[in-house]
Image (cartoon, rainbow, N blue to C red):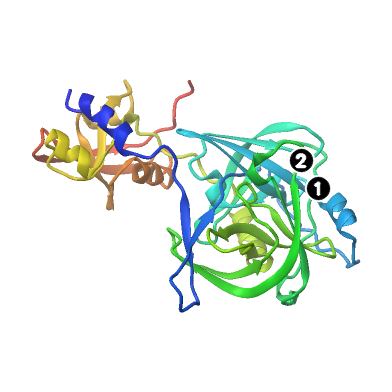
């Protein structure tokens, strides 16, 4: 078949792991790359109430004792590996706030709690523009974190970052620092710039993503999300006021419907692959398998077709196809444009279904 050789080339050309890079704005110097760590997750009550308690200054050990039951480790299985991140319990019904880049493309989410219990989590809702997501779990005895007003933060104020740095065993890692700056902007995010960020010198490492930045009253004032890949101890957190507003909005929308199912397997078409086997297009998704009885088969997709468009969305690779299906649930009618026989552009019609149980 056309893509038999292509499979071999694809494994050589494509990297095994993807790294999210940001760049920091607001400087005359060359914009540094920012490396964002990975992974996270969360039954929802009709009226979720995010805690906002009275203030008492705490010692760092007391603060950690207060927050640890509200901080979870999120382990994620992907098609090409695993990742670990952190989440913060939003309410006792099982909602957990984390970064979207932690759980994006997750095939399985596992949530570990401070008491040692481990449960499976499911993706609930996301806000890609803010790099936030909610996961939910069916678990009792949850202790929500206390959430503060990030507008009251002052530069130089002490803060503590808590998270599962590097996925190390034995509980979360704690680091202390100060608020270094407010209202920072990071440019280069795939879905737009991240604005209104808190900058801190509290150490933030891979695995901290989705974890809390906490003031000395024990309130979560930010969600740790990124660090600069050069320099020393320059990390960033999404301000909690923006995160709370987004969380309330996501909860009100309810759980996202499961993605639509097309029923194809395949490989990414790249420039190198197209040149090597003489393909007429330089990008798309090459079909190498079709599930019997699937929407793809019923629509008339054939082996070796290259999917280049779904409705009005251009498909450059499997990631584009996955994102399209995630935004179009079962029952959606779709137009599928494929390149066939290395020359013909074929337009097909199909209806997405639920993914069958395995």
**Taking 67 as reference, is 330 above or below it?**
above
The x, y position of residue 333, in whole percent, is 32, 42
**Label of residue 68 in the image:** 1
Q: Outermost residue, front direction? A: 231
Residue 135 showing in the rendered view: yes
The x, y position of residue 26, in whole percent, is 50, 77
- Which of these two is toward me, 302 or 11? 11
- Which of these two is toward me, 261 or 179? 179
**Label of residue 144 in the image:** none
- Which of these two is toward me, 278 or 266? 278
**Taking 54 as reference, is 62 above or below it?**
above
Q: Residue at x 19, y 29 (%)?
A: 304
In the rendered structure, are the residues bearing label 2 and label 1 in contact, judged by CB atoms less than 8 Å apart?
yes
Disc 2: CA contacts within 10 A as few (<14), some (14-19) or many (>=20): some
Real-space Cα separation, disc 2 to disc 1, in angstroms = 9 Å
Q: Quadrant of residue 84?
A: top right
Q: Outermost residue, bottom direction? A: 28
In the image, taking residue 278 as reference, residue 356 lies left or right, namely: right
First of labels 2, 1 by sequence position: 1
Position of the N terminus by quadrant: top left
Q: Residue at x 70, y 61 (%)?
A: 202
**Label of residue 171 in the image:** 2
The x, y position of residue 236, in whole percent, is 61, 63
In the image, taking residue 37 as reference, residue 298 lies left or right, namely: left
Disc 1: CA contacts within 10 A as few (<14), some (14-19) or many (>=20): many
Q: Secondary structure at mark 1?
A: helix
Q: Secondary structure at mark 2?
A: loop
In the image, taking residue 340 as reference, residue 160 lies left or right, namely: right
User: Is label 2 or label 1 in front?
Assistant: 2
The x, y position of residue 229, in whole percent, is 53, 58
Q: Residue at x 33, y 26 (%)?
A: 294
């Amino acid at each position: 078949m056309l893509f038999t050789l292509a499979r071999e080339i694809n494994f050589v050309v494509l990297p095994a792991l993807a790294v999210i890079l940001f760049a920091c704005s607001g400087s005359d110097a060359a914009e540094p790359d920012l490396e964002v760590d990975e992974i996270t997750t969360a039954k929802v009550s009709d009226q979720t109430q995010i805690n906002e308690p009275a203030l008492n200054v705490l010692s760092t050990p007391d603060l950690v004792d207060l927050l640890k039951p509200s901080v979870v480790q999120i382990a994620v299985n992907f098609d090409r590996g695993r990742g670990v991140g952190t989440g913060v319990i939003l309410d006792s019904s099982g909602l957990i706030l984390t970064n979207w880049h932690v759980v994006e493309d997750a095939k399985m989410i596992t949530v570990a709690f401070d008491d040692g219990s481990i449960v499976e989590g499911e993706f609930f809702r996301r806000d890609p523009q803010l790099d936030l997501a909610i996961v939910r779990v069916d678990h009792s005895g949850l202790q929500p974190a206390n959430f503060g007003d990030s507008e009251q933060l002052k530069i130089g104020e002490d803060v503590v970052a808590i998270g599962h740095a590097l996925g190390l065993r034995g509980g979360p890692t704690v680091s202390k620092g100060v608020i270094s700056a407010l209202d920072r902007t990071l440019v280069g995010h795939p879905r737009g710039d991240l604005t209104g960020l808190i900058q801190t010198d509290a150490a933030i490492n891979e695995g901290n993503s989705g974890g809390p930045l906490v003031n000395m009253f024990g309130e979560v004032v930010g969600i740790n999300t990124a660090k600069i890949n050069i320099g020393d101890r320059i990390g960033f957190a999404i301000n909690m006021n923006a995160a709370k507003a987004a969380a309330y909005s996501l909860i009100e929308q309810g759980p996202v419907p499961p993605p639509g199912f097309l029923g194809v397997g395949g490989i990414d078409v790249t420039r190198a692959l197209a040149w090597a086997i003489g393909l007429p297009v330089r990008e798309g998704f090459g079909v190498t398998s079709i599930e019997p009885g699937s929407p793809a088969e019923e629509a008339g997709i054939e082996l070796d077709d290259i999917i280049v468009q779904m409705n009005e969305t251009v498909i450059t690779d499997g990631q584009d196809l996955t994102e399209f299906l995630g935004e179009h649930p079962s029952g959606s009618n779709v137009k599928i444009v494929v390149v066939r026989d290395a020359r013909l552009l074929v337009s097909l019609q199909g209806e997405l279904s639920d993914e069958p149980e395995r």
